[in-house]
Image (spheres, rainbow, N blue to C red):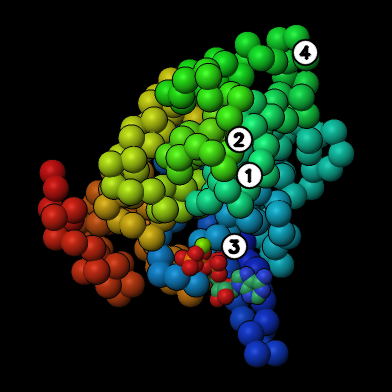
Amino acid sequence: MSVLAVSNLAKRYRRGGEPFAAVDDVSFEIEQAETLALAGPSGSGKSTIARLVLRLIGPDAGRIDFEGHDFLALSGAALRARRARLQMVFQDPLAAFNPRATVARVLDDPLRMHNIASRTERPRHIAALLQRVGLDAGLAARAIHEISGGQRQRVAIARAIATRPSLIVLDEAVSALDVSVRGQILELLLDLQRQERIAYLFISHDLGVIRAIAHRVVILDAGRVAESGDARTVIANPQSAIGKALVAATPRLIRNRP
Ligand SMILES: Nc1ncnc2c1ncn2[C@@H]1O[C@H](COP(=O)(O)OP(=O)(O)OP(=O)(O)O)[C@@H](O)[C@H]1O
Ligand SMILES: [Mg+2]
C-alpha cells in the first residue's frame, strides 16, 4: 500500500477574471520510505499540489488517499489523528514560526497538541528531538530569530518528526540555504528516512538537489504532468520539452556527477 496516492487532482484559480487550471489532472503515488520530487518551472503548480495534499486548500476534483484512507473525507478526531502522520517543512521557518518563540516552545507545541508526552516528559522529548537533528540541547532556550538559517531548518525538521509522521511534504525546504548547509540538511533528511522509513514529497526547482535526494520525479508544466519516472533516468535523459529545458538550465557540473 502506498503512503500517499493522489488521483486526478485539479485546482482552478482565476487570472484576470479568467479561470485557469493551476493543477490539472495530476496523479502520483509515494511508497513508504520513498522520496518523490515535484519539479517544474515557477508557476507550474508545485506549491498548489503541496497545499492540496496538506488540506490547506480544497481541490476542484480528484482524490487523495493517505495511509489507505480517503483523506478528503476525514473530519474531526479522525482527521486530527491522521494529520499527525503528515507533516511539512517550508522554505522559510522564520515565516512558519513565531520568530520570538523559543526553540523549546516550537517543539513543545506538536507534543502537546497530539498528546505525545506529558508535561513532565516533554523537556526530555525536546532534548531527544534536538539531538536527533544534530542540534545541541542548549539551543532549546534560544529564540527562533537568534539561531542560524540552517539551525532553524533543523528545528523545522525536528518539529515535523515530533509526531512520528509517515510522510513529510517539503516545499523548497533547502532552497534558501547556502550550498554547504544545504548538503548537511539533505544528509539529515536521508538519515531520517533510512532510520524512520519516512516518505518525502520533495518540491524543488533544483534538479541537482532532486538528483541527490529523490527516488522518482514528476515534472510539471502548467499544472499538468509532463513526464515522470526514476529521478536519475529522467534527469539524464528527459523526454518532455519542459524536462529538456529544465535539464539544459542546470549547470553541467551537477548534471554529469556520477
Ligand atoms: N491563491 C491563488 N489565487 C490565484 N492564483 C494562484 C493562487 N495560488 C497560486 N496561484 C497561481 O497558480 C499557479 C501555480 O502556482 P504555484 O504556487 O503552485 O506554483 P509553483 O510551481 O509552486 O511556483 P514556484 O516555483 O514559483 O514556487 C501560478 O500561476 C500562481 O500564480
Ligand atoms: Mg512554489
Camera-near label (2 vs 4) is: 2
Q: Badge 2, how many Cα within 10 Å: few under 14, some, many 20+? A: some
Kindly state the secondary structure of the residue where label 4 is placed: loop
Mark 3 Cβ and ligand 1 under 8 Å apart: yes
Camera-near label (3 vs 4) is: 4
Residue at image coords 63%, 11%: 124
Give the camera-side residue of 43 and 175: 175
Which residue corresponds to mark 3? 48
The first of marks 4 and 1 along the sequence is 1
Which residue corresponds to mark 4? 118
Residue type, label 4: Ser
User: Do the numbered discs 1 and 2 sit on residues whose CB atoms are within 8 Å?
Assistant: yes
Which residue corresponds to mark 2? 143
Camera-near label (1 vs 3) is: 1
Mark 1 Cβ and ligand 2 under 8 Å apart: no
User: Do the numbered discs 3 and 4 sit on residues whose CB atoms are within 8 Å?
Assistant: no
Which residue corresponds to mark 1? 99
User: Do the numbered discs 1 and 3 sit on residues whose CB atoms are within 8 Å?
Assistant: no
Q: In 3D space, how far apart are the residues under numbered discs 4 and 1 (Cα atoms)?
A: 25 Å
